[in-house]
Image (cartoon, rainbow, N blue to C red):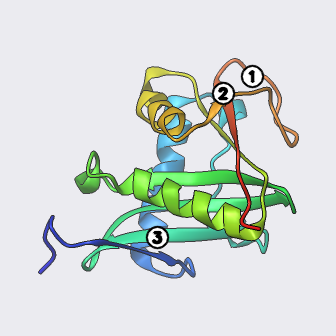
C-alpha cells in the first residue's frame, strides 16, 4: 500500500505506461484549457519521445506523483518541459524534487543554462513561484519562441560539474 510517507523515487520513464500517458494527456488538456491554442507549448506523448528529450517520472510507492522533462537545446543549454504533478500529490514537494533532479542532471551534462516557458495567468502562478524559488528569472523568448502575450520565459545559469 502506498502512503504519504513513502519516499519519492525519480526515474527515467520510457513513456509506455498508462499512468504517464494519462498524466501527460491531462497536462496537454490543461494547457489547452488555460491558454489560446497559439500559446500552447506543451508536448504530446509522441513529441516527448524525441532523442533530445529525457522525461522522468516521480513515484511514491506504486503511485505516479508527477513528471518533468529536459530537452537539450545545445551542449550548453537545456529546456525544462512537461512539468506536471498528479492532482493527489499537489503541494507535497513533488515538482520541487523533479526540478532539483533536472537541475542536477543539467550540471552533469555540462549545461551552462536552463530555460523554460510557462503561462502568465493565475493558473500558472504556482509554477512561476516554484521556478523563481529555484533561481529562474524572466528572460526574452528563446529557441524559436516568440512573444505571444500569454507566455512567460524564464532562465537560470547552471554551474556545470567540472
The mark nearer the N terminus, 1 or 3, is 3
Element assignment for label 3: strand
- Farthest residue to the top: give it: 149
Q: Position of residue 75 (x, y in %)?
A: 87, 63
152 relative to 55, above or below: above
Residue in view at x 42 percent, y 76 percent = 18
Task: Give the numbered dot on residue 148.
Answer: 1
Circle 1 packing at 10 Å, graded few (<14), some (14-19), many (20+), is few
Q: Which residue is mark 2?
A: 151
What is the quadrant of residue 71 in the picture? Answer: bottom right
Q: Is residue 134 visible?
A: yes
Q: Using the numbered discs, state the Cα–Cα distance from disc 1 to disc 3 in whole angstroms.
A: 30 Å
Which of the pair 133/1 is nearer the observer? 133
- Cβ–Cβ under 8 Å for marks 1 and 2: yes
Which of the pair 7/47 is nearer the observer? 7
Q: Is residue 88 left or right of residue 157?
A: left
Element assignment for label 1: loop
Q: Which residue is mark 3?
A: 57
Residue in view at x 85 percent, y 57 percent = 76
Amino acid at each position: 500500500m502506498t502512503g504519504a510517507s513513502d519516499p519519492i523515487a525519480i526515474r527515467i520513464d520510457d513513456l509506455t505506461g498508462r499512468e504517464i500517458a494519462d498524466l501527460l494527456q491531462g497536462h496537454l488538456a490543461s494547457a489547452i484549457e488555460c491558454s489560446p491554442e497559439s500559446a500552447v507549448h506543451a508536448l504530446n506523448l509522441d513529441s516527448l519521445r524525441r532523442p533530445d528529450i529525457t522525461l522522468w517520472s516521480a513515484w511514491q510507492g506504486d503511485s505516479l506523483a508527477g513528471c518533468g522533462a529536459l530537452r537539450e537545446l545545445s551542449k550548453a543549454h537545456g529546456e525544462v518541459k512537461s512539468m506536471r504533478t498528479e492532482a493527489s500529490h499537489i503541494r507535497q514537494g513533488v515538482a520541487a524534487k523533479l526540478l532539483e533532479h533536472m537541475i542536477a542532471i543539467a550540471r552533469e551534462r555540462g549545461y551552462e543554462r536552463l530555460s523554460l516557458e510557462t503561462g502568465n495567468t493565475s493558473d500558472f502562478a504556482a509554477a512561476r513561484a516554484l521556478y523563481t524559488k529555484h533561481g529562474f528569472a524572466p528572460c526574452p523568448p528563446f529557441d524559436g519562441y516568440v512573444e505571444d502575450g500569454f507566455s512567460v520565459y524564464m532562465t537560470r545559469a547552471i554551474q556545470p560539474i567540472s
